[in-house]
Amino acid sequence: MIICKTITSLQQQLIPINQKQQTIGFVPTMGALHEGHLSLIRASNSQNDCTVCSIFVNPTQFNNQEDYNKYPNTITQDIYQLELAGCNILFLPDVKEMYPDGILISKQYNLDYLENILEGEYRPNHFQGVCQIVEKLLSIINPNQLFLGQKDYQQCMVIKKLIELMDKKGAIKLEIIPTIREKTGLAMSSRNARLNEAEKENATAIFKAMMHIKKYLNKKSFDTLEKEATELLQNHAFEKVDYIKICNATNLQEVQNTNSSQKLVVLIAAFLNGVRLIDNMQLN
């Protein structure tokens, strides 16, 4: 695996690949890699001639400086895992490389209602920061395919919108890979590294809450299900629940009752000992 720390060196490595008209798959990450990330690498490898992974903890998408400062850094282990997974190129820039003019959101992206619901409501400007860094990375790498994990459901929809805004809809194919879970049902996440074993056990309540909603979807009102799921989390030491929402899986508009023609998804965000965890599950 080749490691590039500058945009220039990365683009130099991509020249012969582009000249041979070989395909490039891209997996953007913030490091602290786990099996979920590696599943994206393997998916890219199976469909492309070259897989590029980036590791960059993007400061503009954090609306909480403490959260940014505490984000796990396991770069030696990450490199080892990427090599084992067969990644071809790792792009490992620092903040100055990606933001030579300073850490600013210099451009506004028209994300419509997606920016103000769910994650957008609780993390102002988060998706503007996400779009800023992903646009930079896509412009640098110019991949044929972009691989994202379904755990970040709303972010996948935002980046789909970004690709349209960049007028790259036909040039970059977005591939969304199913969430990888522990045997307990806990979604694999870089933030799990901040939980001890007892907290990880409590964190499985998110999965249990989603399964509860799925089980009783056609038997109880959505308001009742959301309240019961909230109580389940609170009974497992979650100190704060940002949201538990049942939404249309296609557009993330909140729904109030079952409609057989609608695909539904439940999305959850909650705090466990100061660590904010998110998850989702398709319901029908």
Image (cartoon, grey):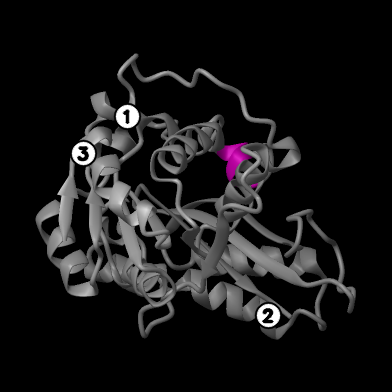
Which is more foreground, mark 2 or mark 1?
A: 1
Q: Which mark is residue 9?
A: 3
The kind of residue tagged 1 is Met
Residue at 9 percent of width and 56 percent of height:
76
The kind of residue tagged 3 is Ser
Q: Is residue 176 magenta?
A: no
Which is more foreground, mark 1 or mark 3?
A: 3
The kind of residue tagged 2 is Lys
Task: Report how far apart the C-alphas of labels 2 and 1 lie in the structure.
Answer: 42 Å
In the image, residue 37 sits, relative to residue 62, either above or below, namely below
For label 3, count other residues whose C-alpha is less than 10 Å away and answer few (under 14), some (14-19) or many (20+).
few
Q: Position of residue 253 (x, y in %)?
A: 79, 53
Task: Report how far apart the C-alphas of labels 1 and 3 lie in the structure.
Answer: 14 Å
In this picture, which residue range is highlighted in magenta?
Answer: 118-122
Of label 1 and label 3, which has the lower sequence position?
3
Residue at 39 percent of width and 38 percent of height:
140
Name the residue tied to disc 2. 214
